[in-house]
Image: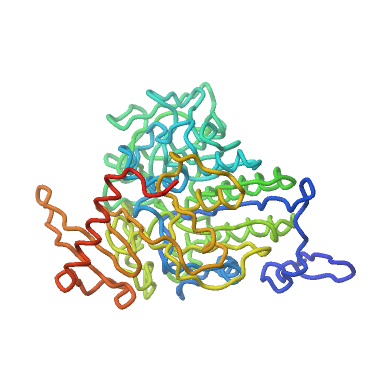
Amino acid sequence: MKSRLFFGRLALPSWVIILGIMTPMISKPAKLNGEDRLPNIVIIYADDLGYGDIGCYGAKQVKTPNIDRLAKDSLRFTDAHSQAATCTPSRYSLLTGEYAWRKKGTDILPGNANLIIAPGRTTLPGMLQKAGYQTGVVGKWHLGLGNKDLDWNKEIKPGPLEIGFNSCFLVPATGDRVPCVYVENHRVYNLDPADPIQISYNKPLEGEPTGKDHPELLKMKLSHGHDQTIINGISRIGYMTGGKKARWVDEDMADVLTNQANQFIEKNKNKPFFLYFATHDIHVPRVPHQRFKGKSQCGIRGDAIEQLDDCVGRVLATLEKNHLTSNTIVIFSSDNGPVLDDGYADRAVQDLGNHKPAGALRGGKYSRYEGGTRVPFLIRWPEKIKPGVSTALICQIDLLASLATLVKQKLSPEAAPDSMDVLAALLGNSQQGRDILIEQGNGLQVRKGNWKYIPANLPKKKKAKFTAELYDLQADLGEKKNLAQEHPEKVKELHTILETIQKQGRSRTP
């Protein structure tokens, strides 16, 4: 039986509300002290999802109806960026408002890394917490936990709770790295004390087979790396023993995380809340639930995208069910561009068909080109934002300063050193975003307006030397024609900008 929502004497199917057809009839925001309640904020942060991987950005072979419905009611950005072309630095920058390349140790972290965000510094959740929000993170973390020699069998701190979150339910690093357990607040979730966890990234541990020595035990073969401890028939990066009761099942991960995200919304529905929902999909290992296997036209990677879309739909449905849609800001984006073969032989390349994960962009994850950091970015707030398309240049790093302005929180001069206030662009009141962006992907690159500058790299060992590159993205979105020799003055200008921002230590003017 289809669910129905009642407005007076008129019964309407819930899908009508989701489609935005009845947007004017969505309930008004609650009042706090006589004023409109602060908007709830939900960031849905996909993993390795490319610019062209979803329908509202041009995908045809992969179906993403829930994300596309969200896009219909959103402001959709065509020049929005993650800070880096890999996960850890993008997440670090999103939460701190600082270019990750300014801080050592923010490259892709091992699963046993210590927390890289210092407790006490200004963060996105911490700023919102001070504004009166209940803050929670669910999903992939990959920013380290604890300090010194972390014991996974005891309290795990510092972590998200020490940098501004009220609660957390985490995948500590990535799905392809040990430990393959969830962490809830300060403890491994469902851990049996009689079966203690041991983790090593230096040497093998006795008691668990590895993919390298026992490939016959694998249900997903590897293509490179990922040949250490086998968990759930999949070999990982790193070694792990113990914690068998606490170990995740890859096929169930999307459901587990989405249920946790929805529980956070239900628990906090009567007060302003901020949810950072960092999905695991579509990162490797791609092991979608059985109900999604074979659903797409692009093999298992496409199936994982359709599973991601289902998770988005379930979160949106929870907001709708609780009459929170109207005054909730929903932001959907990705931590970097797409990758196909990322260590497992899952036929992502062979089954791609005509699908273009980066759309018309060049490059992808790890890349110096636009496909590395230009990602989908949707923002919906029915009370304030008109649906449409924006060409403004923005970066996820800008959310801290922009949302601080929205909720009337003044940032200290040292806080969020590279976060720009682009609130006018986010609200659709301006097509002007930030003027300059430093992209991070196999080095640093500079965006200024339509120009993209990639400095020359000196050869390292046997790696090839890169010459300087300059592209006019308005005329050449695919970065095919290098204009560096034709415009030496522009190369010099952008090179000077890069050096200046590096030396200054910050780019935001307090």
Residue 125: x and y in percent read 55, 42
Q: In the shown orientation, is residue 384 left or right of residue 458?
A: right
Q: Report the residue at 24% width, 51% height from top.
A: 499
Question: Who is closer to the viewer here, 91 or 437?
Answer: 437
Q: In the shown orientation, is residue 502 left or right of residue 187?
A: left
Q: Report the residue at 75% width, 46% height from top.
A: 270
Q: Residue 341 is drawn in which quadrant?
A: bottom left
Name of the residue lying farthest toward the front: 510
Question: Who is closer to the viewer here, 306 or 11?
Answer: 11
Whether residue 185 is visible to the viewer of this picture, yes or no, is: yes
On screen, residue 19 above or below 252: below
Residue 20: x and y in percent read 68, 70
Q: In the shown orientation, is residue 230 left or right of residue 462?
A: right
Q: How is the image coloured?
A: rainbow
Question: Who is closer to the viewer here, 316 or 441?
Answer: 441
Whether residue 301 is visible to the viewer of this picture, yes or no, is: no
Q: Report the residue at 30% width, 68% height from top.
A: 451
Numbered marks: total? 0
Residue 271: x and y in percent read 72, 45
Q: Quadrant of the N terminus?
A: bottom right
